[in-house]
Amino acid sequence: MIRYILRRLLLMIPVAFLVTIGVFVLARISPVDPVLVFAGEERDPVQLEAIRHQLGLDQPLPIQYVAWLTHALQGDLGRSFQNHQRVAEAIIERLPATLELGAAALLISVSFALVIGVVSAVKRNSAIDLLSTGVTLMGVSFPSFFLGVLLILLFSYVIPGRIFPPGGYTPLTTDAGQNLRYLVLPAVTLATASLALNLRQVRSSLLEVFGLDYMRTARGKGLREGTIITRHALKNALIPVVTLVGIQVGAIIEGAVITETIFSWPGVGRLVVQAIPSHDYPVVQGVVLVSALSFMLSTLLVDVLYARVDPRISFESAA
Amino acid sequence: MAGTTVPLVLGRARNERVASTIYFLRRNPRMIVGGAIVLAWLFLAAFAPIIAPFDPIKVNVIESLEPPNSTHWLGTDDLGRDVFSRVLWGSRISLSVGLISVSIGLLVGTSLGLAAGYIGGKFDLLIMRGVDALLAFPALILAIAITSALGPQIQNAMIAIGIVAIPAYARLTRGQVLAVRARDFIVAARTIGCSPLRIVMRHIFPNVMNALIVQATLSTAFAILAEAALSFLGLGPQPPYPSWGQDINYSQRYLANLKWWMSVGPGVAIFTAVFAFNFLGDALRDALDPRLRRSA
């Protein structure tokens, strides 16, 4: 097992190296001179050259890359051009809000997917099944930002009493009740797309398992239907669902970009969106790097978990 | 004699093709529904300048913020611009970004996949590590990063979404090439002296076509959604030009005044277009490639 994880980590290194090159190049292909962005109102050529030298931007690109990578490996992702805050610090500051939103969305998505997916598979072709299939199909095609706008319209303005606020954030530690009120709409918005995917996966995995011989044996033994589903069917059917959810965990920052923007949620996604118009490349670069690496790590964890929960997969062949 | 027989045979073959197409469509009603909505959007986009009742960017403050009525079917925005006309013109942007970016992904990804799968060795290793690196980025984050680096313009959105689409085509094509390259007909083609280019294009590529058609349809749905997301974040076409995502973002400032029609028009447009391509793609996958159906 440890050998397998180490081998996978080693295989990740060249890909991670290419990812860092990609992130570095992306920040350098922009037609906007970063020195002008950093300097703000300052336009004195001598001062601009001094800033360029201090930022190391007068060096050849490979040297700039090595310097950037060396700093990044030590956790230093540079400073924001806008407010000169350390990028790593800015990301860490906003990470709890993003993780809270992501965790709430996953909780909603997975719990609803499990309940509706199981009912849908057990009562195949029933009204509930048809409804859930329709919801699945619509969920994957429904733009999250449109859903967010509709939810704000309905729960913040149309229904009297402003059940949920249209945007904002109160930390969990300051006021848990208020935090929950702010959390509901963005979490539901973020959960919808993944709910559709998870629901489809739970339903189709269960239907596949229902057709297998050991299920017939379980029924033949006279086990209760509830026991058959929870103890026998779900155990195997959930393996692909675990994979899917694991990948969704890694893509939390990606999902949060749009949702955090709609609901003014002060997370990492909003940080990158606010950095774009002001050409704050160190911030964009930092967030892109962190989200790519977390995506890669979660994929690795999913593979390890997959190999662990499914005895049919041997570590040798999976590697 | 021969002169009369050949057209008869060809005519029968044509009739059989038409009959089998009708049979195929009748057995796949989802394809008809999805295809019809896709065709409807393509028609609306192509003829938007004729169909749209108003100029989508013409300001008319006298008629601003009007709810849907007989003159302005989907109402007007704060500058008095007709929402229906903006939705129609916006379809030109969304569909063209969708189709062009998918073409970029298809062309580059398929070429890389064919070359990597056929040539193999170090070339394959190099290409596939590059593809893995692209796959390591969450799709929307990569599209945002590329568009923000190149600048918020429609052509940059196309390039960004196209680059994001490359890995799926490259992996799919490479997998299919590896599956057929050792088959007898490829060995036979090599034995009779076919050039590598001819083998790839005439013998391997047709075997990949079905999977590519399915992938292209499904990734057009993703591309339309991604373009709308980029526009929503201000990284697509810039105002005053109409774009579905950007118009929804703009409408947010009037939600408190309950001017719902400003966002409902473009929102429903995105949903129906993405839904149609997803629906069509799913139906094509079930019909053309049952193996993909199982793995989905």
Image (cartoon, coloured by chain):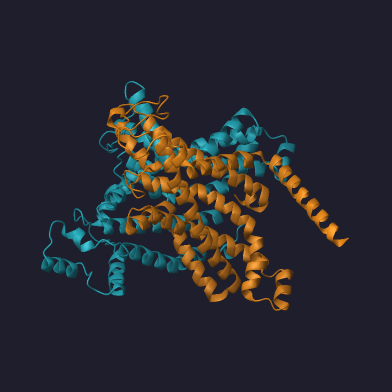
Chain colours: A cyan, B orange
Q: Residue at 63% of width from left, 40% of height from top?
A: B32
Percent from the top left, x then y, of residue B69?
Answer: 40, 24
Task: Answer above or below: position of B170 versus A211.
Answer: below
For the residue pair B108 and A302, the one nearer the viewer reads as B108
- From the viewer's perspective, is B7 left or right of A218? right
Question: Where is residue B124, by image quadrant?
Answer: bottom right
Task: Answer above or below: position of A66 versus B238.
Answer: below
Residue extending furthest toward the top: A160
Task: Answer above or below: position of A79 versus A240.
Answer: below
For the residue pair B175 and A35, the one nearer the viewer reads as A35
Q: Residue at 51% of width from left, 63% of height from top?
A: B108
* Quadrant of image for the C terminus of chain A: bottom right
For the residue pair B23 and A82, the one nearer the viewer reads as B23
Total marks placed: 0
Q: Residue at 11% of width from left, 68% of height from top?
A: A46
Question: Where is residue A230, by image quadrant?
Answer: top right
- From the viewer's perspective, is A308 left or right of B64? right
Percent from the top left, x then y, of residue B77?
Answer: 33, 33
For the residue pair B225 and B5, the one nearer the viewer reads as B5
Percent from the top left, x then y, of residue B143?
Answer: 40, 54
- From the viewer's perspective, is A122 left or right of B47? right
Percent from the top left, x then y, of residue A64?
Answer: 28, 71
Residue A152 appears in the figure: yes
